Image (cartoon, grey):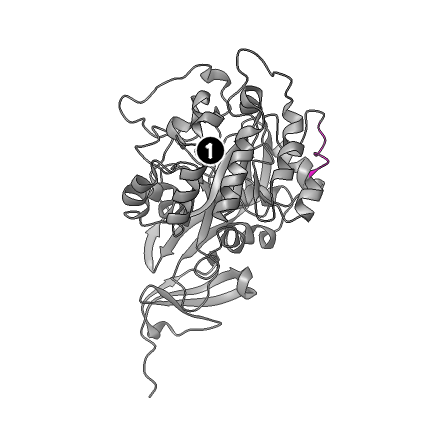
Amino acid sequence: MAEPAGYDILLKGGHVICPANGIDGIRDVAVRDGRIAAVEETILPSSATETIDVSGKLVLPGMIDTHGHVYQYVTGRFGLNPDMVGVHSGVTTVIDQGGPSCMTLPGFRKFIAEPSETRIYAFLSAYLVGGLEGHYYPNLYSPDCVDIEATVRSAIANRDLVRGIKGHAEIGGFARWGIKVMEMAAEIARRAEVPLYVHFGTLWGLPESGANGEDADTILERVIPLLKEGDVLAHPFTRHPGGFVNQQGEVHHVIQAALDRGLKVDVGHGSHFSYRLAKKAIAAGVVPHTLGADMHGYNTHVPAPAGTPEEHYDDENHPFKGQARFSLTQAMSSMMALGLSLQDVVPMVTINPAKMIGLTDRVGSLTVGYAADISVLDDNRGRFLLRDNEDTKVVAERLLTPAFCLRAGKKFDADAVILPRAVAA
Ligand SMILES: [Zn+2]
């Protein structure tokens, strides 16, 4: 008699989609010693200590959220608990976008990346201050507050953790300092040999002196020449000025050439995501490469740490303001409601982000021998109401919700309090 295979966990009967390995069908997935041991059409339940029936569910490579804010406690109310955004939301890898800087990265490693159950990486802030208190203080982001040498050194010395650089190209910064900071951010990324992830869309708002001759609609065409293949344009569908759709309602003419040149697009959903503008850009052929939920403490509802700023100047008009709940998985449903297929959307949370961070050798696919990072989603059919912060309503006939994930073979239920609830249309 053959030796029993001795698997620890068997995920039985799910719809497995693994774009990297060309799998899209009913498969069983077996895990042993925290690693993927087999992906087969049928694996006997007797070969595993625990069998989980996942029939009717989607079984995906552990989802990667390319845009989170998880430098908890250090970045004020902005930074969420990493495992709340991660494994407890069905997401096995979270990339913090610009929370830590060269000055605060050691703390990020010790207090966030190391203790988290979720796999954590960072795009290092181009600014010395990092993402403290969610960028509420624009003057901390001037060219005087960037140290190219120190940031390059930090990125290179922490290559295991730092997978890119984060910068912001928006009208508030341009009106204050022009394009200088973006040139500095691009130099950091080039010298550190990692991608640059660029936030587009109003963040800081104009200084008292006004726009100073700057125009939100010209920022993309001036920044794109600084970028190279693999760099990332973020927030294409923002409802704020400076995204892919200009103030005349047209998709910016420089986008297609940028995509042809190998620049990437990350949804970076956040509270500024607009169905109206997404529909327009997708119809013009813009298919994002990665999804990025962009969850943080100002666009979700979690208690503020005592003594952190309760309100800020001009809160009412702040770009973060918004009530509609969202999540990485709900952003997948949104993309499908806008006409993309499940097969279009799954790569955006699996193999494409793995490529973005240069780690296809360990994440983004269900490859035998890789750590067993696996996301299991419910695939709900019906009529569900999705709403953005412009109050545009979209009816989704398919609503994906996280059920649970395995992170290196350890099971976590999707029980995060920030997850949106399904609303019937
Ligand atoms: Zn963000």
Where is 400 relative to 125, above or below? below
Q: Which residues are magenta?
A: 249-254
**Residue 241 occupies which quadrant of the picture?**
top right
Residue 91 at least partly seen: no
Q: Which residue occupies the foreground of this view, 111 or 349?
A: 111
- Residue 326 is situated, as x and y percent measured from the top left of the image, at 47, 36
Q: Which residue occupies the foreground of this view, 416 or 173?
A: 173
Where is 242 relative to 293, above or below? above
Where is 67 relative to 200, above or below? below
Q: Does the magenta-highlighted stretch encompass residue 250?
A: yes
Q: What is the quadrant of the N terminus in the image?
A: bottom left
- Residue 289 is situated, as x and y percent measured from the top left of the image, at 58, 48
Q: Which residue occupies the foreground of this view, 126 or 202?
A: 126
At 48% from the left and 51% from the top, the residue drawn is 357
- Residue 85 is situated, as x and y percent measured from the top left of the image, at 39, 42
Q: Which residue occupies the foreground of this view, 310 or 393?
A: 310
Determine which residue is flagged by label 1.
325
Q: Does the magenta-highlighted stretch encompass residue 78?
A: no
Under mark 1, the amino acid is Arg
Q: Is residue 368 left or right of residue 34?
A: right
What predominant SS class does the magenta segment belong to? loop
Q: How many marks?
A: 1
- Helix, strand or loop status at disc 1: loop
Q: Is residue 228 left or right of residue 121?
A: right
